Amino acid sequence: MAKSTIVSSVLLLACLVVSKPALAAVKPAPGYDVSLEACIKKMTQPCGLELFRNIFHDGPDVSDSCCGILVEMGDPCHSEFVDVVLSNDNFYARTADYLKRSLNAWKRCKSIVEGTDAPASS
């Protein structure tokens, strides 16, 4: 039950960010996972949208400024967001592809923030 509440809340947040940015400040449902809520507070709407499009909609690379926010947010938060989206049946069929994109986005952003060469995407 808690997992479905988390999935619903994250998908609602993603839909609001994509379709109506002004409404994205809607509070999550009661019972919302505390760690995920803490992660959401670290991410901005525009950067969350960039990441979502990059990983789940073949979007362009995440901007350098959003990479900074992603790396500051941390890998555990990034992984939790991706896992929650992948728990939805609409994304499950391409799980391997999305996990690969997620890892590539993380590695690229981390290398940008650390000032090292980004690994080649494969």
Image (spheres, grey):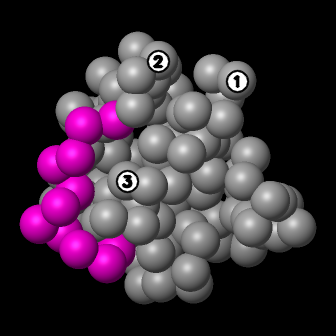
Q: Mark 1 points at which residue?
A: 1
Q: Residue at x 72, y 53 (%)?
A: 88
Q: Can residue 112 be seen in this view?
A: no
User: Is 88 in front, or is 107?
Assistant: 88
Viewed as shown, does residue 41 lie left or right of 78?
Answer: left
Q: Does the magenta stretch include residue 86?
A: no
Q: Name the residue under label 3.
A: 13
Quadrant where the C terminus sits is bottom right
Magenta residues, start to end: 18-28
The disc placed on residue 56 is none
Q: Residue at x 31, y 78 (%)?
A: 19
User: Is 111 in front, or is 46?
Assistant: 46
**Residue 16 pos. (x, y %):** 32, 65
Q: What residue type is labelled 2?
A: Gly
Which of marks 3 and 1 precedes in the sequence? 1
- Circle 1 SS class: loop
Q: Which residue is drawn at 29% across and 66% down?
A: 17
